[in-house]
Amino acid sequence: MKILKHFVYAMLPLVFVLVHLVHAQDQSGFISLDCGLPKDSRYSEPTTKIDYISDAPFISSGISKSIFQAYKANQPRHVGLVRSFPQGSRNCYKLKVRRAAKYLIRATFLYGNYDGLNKLPQFDLHLGLNKWATVNFSSVNLITMREIIHITSQSHLQICLININSGTPFISALELRPLKNNTYVTSTGSLALAYRYDIGSTANQSYRYPYDLLDRLWTPYTQKDWTTVTTSHTVDDNNASVYDSYQVPSIVMSTSAAPLKARGGSASWEFYWEPADLTTKYYVYWHFAELQKLQSNQSRAFQVTLNGKLWYPKTFFPTYLKSRTLHSNWASPVSSYNFSLVQLANSTLPPILNAFEVYTVIELFSQPETDQNDVDAINNIKSTYRVSRNWQGDPCLPTEYSWAGVNCNHEYVDNPRIISLNLSSSGLTGEITSYISSLAMLESLDLSNNTLIGSVPESLYRLQKLSVLNLKGNMLTGSVPAELIERSKNGFLSLSVEENQGLCASFSCKKKKNILIPLVSSIGALLVLLSAAAIFVAPAWKKQHGIDARSTVQNTSLEPKQRQFTYSEVLKITNNFERILGKGGFGTVYHGLIKSTDVAVKMLSSSSTEGYHQFQAEVKLLMRVYHRNLTSLVGYCHEGTRIALIYEYMANGNLQSYLSAENTNENVLSWQGRIQIALDAAQGLEYLHNGCEPPIVHRDVKTSNILLARNFQAKLADFGLSKIFPTDSDTHVSTKVAGTPGYLDPEYYKTNRLNEKSDVYSFGVVLLEIITSRPAISRSQERAHISQWVSYVVADGDIRSVIDPRLEGDFEVNSVWKAVEIAMACVSPTSFQRPSMNQVVAELKDCLAIEEARKNHIPLIHAAEADSGEKFYVASSTGSINPLPR
Ligand SMILES: *[C@@H]1O[C@H](CO)[C@@H](O)[C@H](O)[C@H]1NC(C)=O
Ligand SMILES: *[C@@H]1O[C@H](CO)[C@@H](O)[C@H](O)[C@H]1NC(C)=O
Ligand SMILES: *[C@@H]1O[C@H](CO)[C@@H](O)[C@H](O)[C@H]1NC(C)=O
Ligand SMILES: *[C@@H]1O[C@H](CO)[C@@H](O)[C@H](O)[C@H]1NC(C)=O
Ligand SMILES: *[C@@H]1O[C@H](CO)[C@@H](O)[C@H](O)[C@H]1NC(C)=O
Ligand SMILES: *[C@@H]1O[C@H](CO)[C@@H](O)[C@H](O)[C@H]1NC(C)=O
Ligand SMILES: *[C@@H]1O[C@H](CO)[C@@H](O)[C@H](O)[C@H]1NC(C)=O
Ligand SMILES: *[C@@H]1O[C@H](CO)[C@@H](O)[C@H](O)[C@H]1NC(C)=O
Ligand SMILES: *[C@@H]1O[C@H](CO)[C@@H](O)[C@H](O)[C@H]1NC(C)=O
């Protein structure tokens, strides 16, 4: 019967999600994992009615085992199976949680001789990167628990079992319960449970959910010389008082105990303990309620002291049938704890106590985890190749558990970064995944001795720091990207490509094998991609391919100094500044020709040469920045006050001129074209923020700085210039703020503190312009700034009044809604409300997909493969796209 049930559950997961939601409303926010339960199984615990699910979706390792049948008697079902971890020194659960939320986290263990060894193991538990507890056992058939109250810092939580060479780690159940953030408040640290007692209980039974809505476990505790005081009435939370919020269940509060009177006539409680070490800090929670209806000549009043001093500053009178909790919001370590509840002289009744809890403080360092882009990339690589190594938890941290074959640099300011990946002899098959190119700080990549096929992805050129690339002993074909060959020839990259099927690592073999020509003609995009790099290596490249017929010199290396031009060369290139292409913030741009290739030459206004001393270093840095959505810097000139920057030429000019009202109808950019341009620009900006070290803040993102290539691929121009030409803000005097009115981040304007989010703001303005074709600021309007205008019009829900009327309805409304939502998020007044460019890129991709789906007549409701299984999307009533709960 049981097997059949599991089968049915597995077949109908969605139906059961719905059923689950209906009958388990008051378990909302609970995460209840029965570890070792077969994948997709679920059940409701008979005694508590807590709904347990399998832990399989939250961990990729470990094996399911059953405890000995004899030990299952009188135990809850969720400890009958365990997940055991015979392999790897660290195995981690990854759970989705609410960020900055308080949770009670409970790990449960029952050994039950599940491995037949009859040997009690010992191991550690980590929460994220920090040790939380050691797990040890006193008996084969006793449940051990570890509980911690913790505020999450991120939207995921890692709970790891660590092998400390004292037996195999295992776990029976893992439970998370959301708590209110105004309870169990500490000055620092998280709270690990030491004791939680239900005093005076006559039931010889622990209580938890559904009695306790927060699912704390209350263990009965009583002693022979105590007088129990109980009531059959309900004890309420006194929600009118500040002590109300602990929600101790009535069944726990309705029993209490009082100490017997001492001979002197007064009575007191004493709780005495010595901490294991002198640095341990404790938080104590006393829960009181009067259970006796007092006569007029009766009174119960007492004081709470710690080591003889008043701990609670007032006299305490329990309230009839109302819970009150005494606690402090700070703790300091002392060498011994002697808590007393002391009866007052004029009190006729002794102190009573209904329940209490003691926690120790665990300081969890909010150690920065590995850079999220790197983590995403390496996890994608892991799943692409189904890497069988023990790759779990954070790839770089703690350092003693960093992933095999992964090396990290911990010196980066914010988060550790992955700098080397060695998957040599790892049985990899398939193509080289482009996820590798997302490990932006990678210095060394070893994929040798695998059976990789296909070509070397172009995107590897993005790895600016790559100095070792070993592809030896695979079945790769095609040619190594020109950019990498170039770097290898210049001695920046050690490149090994031997023992492959037909992998070519020089310029000449391309011509021989005739690979370039068919590739270029069939994949137009590749041409574009190459052109960014090709311009940079233009002289050498063209010689090789006979484009420049006059030259026969076989010189493939391009020394950095060759990218420096003299002023007289600049005169020649621009034909004495014959044709002006435009005027920008930093100077005038002229058309030029270098060996029959069009270039754009920016002459920088030379009113002041101060601050130019770093010019050369900065320009060299910029020349190393390559991305298909950034205009490439081909060379520069620096002779006294004559300063020029030479860029690749962008045939279709800038985006502003395409959006402006003067633009005639025949040249109107389609909606899809607009989103593609926005996505291109976003990717360029994302690369400046995340792919460059140190990150580059553009400071002047605007439509006139987004240039369009012949095929309308968009590239950002002028990045890094504000760094070269520091404004006054670099002297910390905020008299002048770089940027263009309308695009300027209001927060930056106020605080003069610049960061990547300032660019996000400007990008939001650009996106609004792309949507509306209105200028950033229209002085004739009441709502002068475009963001004010859009939010005013959108408030009526009328998206069609927002979008450029020249599109004449030729767009998918949901795609436009989404674009507006992205843009409005970007122009949020405070930087922390704005998305990162990473998120913007992802959202714009969705936006583009929606529009493309319309064009291809794909229905909007569709299932898409996502990272960890299926995600279903539907269009909600507002037109935005929301993932359905699973
Ligand atoms: C677990 O280990 C701690 C510290 O070594 C010890 O104090 C405790 O008694 C042990 N608990 C059990 C159940 O063996
Ligand atoms: C507690 O949570 C509420 C909302 O859930 C939030 O408004 C409040 O600021 C939080 N308080 C603290 C101290 O974090
Ligand atoms: C309490 O219950 C346990 C088993 O659950 C039993 O062994 C014990 O004798 C009981 N104690 C009392 C006082 O009933
Ligand atoms: C708690 O608050 C609710 C709503 O404010 C009120 O109806 C109820 O009487 C209160 N209970 C107590 C015990 O004060
Ligand atoms: C309180 O008053 C009751 C009668 O109302 C009496 O029986 C009792 O002894 C008195 N107790 C004390 C402590 O005075
Ligand atoms: C604890 O404190 C009480 C009262 O302050 C005192 O009577 C008692 O001796 C103390 N116990 C210990 C073990 O210090
Ligand atoms: C008992 O004495 C305390 C002061 O020590 C006082 O605050 C309280 O009101 C008195 N209670 C009664 C019932 O007299
Ligand atoms: C990668 O690992 C293999 C064996 O584990 C080693 O021989 C090789 O040198 C490593 N490669 C690099 C680049 O360190
Ligand atoms: C290549 O990998 C295989 C396993 O995939 C291994 O047996 C062999 O020793 C490796 N060869 C070299 C030269 O590392």
Image: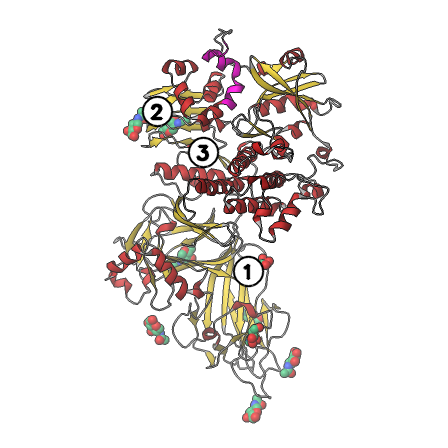
Looking at the figure, which quarter contains the C terminus? bottom left
> Residue 533 in magenta?
yes
Principal secondary structure, stretch drawn in magenta:
helix
Helix or strand or loop: what does disc 3 sit on? strand
- Tell me the distance, in whole angstroms, between the alpha carbons under discs 3 and 1: 38 Å
Q: Is mark 1 within 8 Å of ligand 2?
A: yes
Q: Nearer the viewer, residue 382 or 279?
A: 382
Residue 832, placed above or below residue 441: below
Around disc 2, counting alpha carbons within 10 Å, would you say few (fewer than 14), some (14 to 19), or many (20 or more)? many
Label 2: which residue?
Answer: 476
Q: Residue furthest left?
A: 1
Image region (quadrant) for ligand 2: bottom right
Q: Are marks 3 and 2 in contact (CB under 8 Å)?
A: no
Examine the rendered structure and indicate whether residue 556 appears above or below residue 322. Answer: above
Amino acid type, label 1: Asn
First in sequence: mark 2 vs mark 1: 1
* Residue underneath mark 1: 181
Which of disc 1 and disc 3 is earlier in sequence?
1
Dot 2: element:
strand
Q: Is residue 601 left or right of residue 439?
A: right
Q: Which residue is mark 3?
A: 407
Left or right position of 548 against 773: left
- Magenta stretch holds residue 551: no
Nearer the viewer's eye, disc 3 or disc 2? 2
